[in-house]
Image (cartoon, helix red, strand yellow):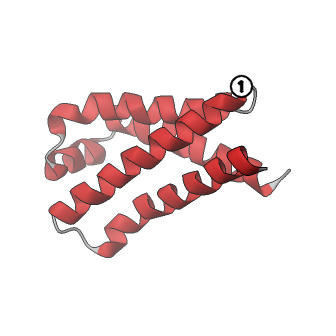
Amino acid sequence: MEPITIITAFTGLSFIAYGINSFISKRMIREFKRWGLADKRKIIGVCQCVGGLGLLIGFEVNIAISISAIFIIIMMLVAILVRIQIKDNISDILPAIAYVLLCAIILYEQLYR
């Protein structure tokens, strides 16, 4: 299996898991309140699931990978800005930065391979 396949599957499954946790995890519900996004928690959870599913669907429908990678990059850039605004530690921001980089790799591979 190619590394890009592993990266894409990992990222897709991670976002599906994050999306589901936005609905059921008490910890995530508290985090959304802390971020000032409690009223947007459900739509963000749906967006996370859609982005993750799009990456997985992209194994069969190529354009879905590019669209989903861009979508996730935008979500993670906003997440980074929110965390900077609320003065989170860099260690709390690193996962969002990592997902921006992973999706940038996915997008690059999709567009330039």
- The one nearer the camera, 106 or 14, is 106
Q: Residue furthest right?
A: 1
Q: Residue furthest bottom?
A: 90
Whole-percent x, y for residue 39 in the image: 16, 32
User: Which kind of residue does numbered mark 1 sit on?
Assistant: Val
SS for dot 1: loop
Which image quadrant is residue 21 in? top left
Whole-percent x, y for residue 83 in the image: 24, 60
Q: Residue at x 62, y 48 (%)?
A: 107
Q: Residue at x 30, y 50 (%)?
A: 78
Residue 99 visible? The answer is yes
- The one nearer the camera, 77 or 30, is 77
Q: Residue at x 24, y 41 (%)?
A: 29
Whole-percent x, y for residue 19 in the image: 42, 36
Residue 17 visible? The answer is no
Q: Which residue is mark 1?
A: 61
Q: Residue at x 36, y 54 (%)?
A: 77
Is disc 1 surrounded by few (<14), some (14 to 19) or many (20+) residues within 10 Å?
few
Whole-percent x, y for residue 15 in the image: 49, 42
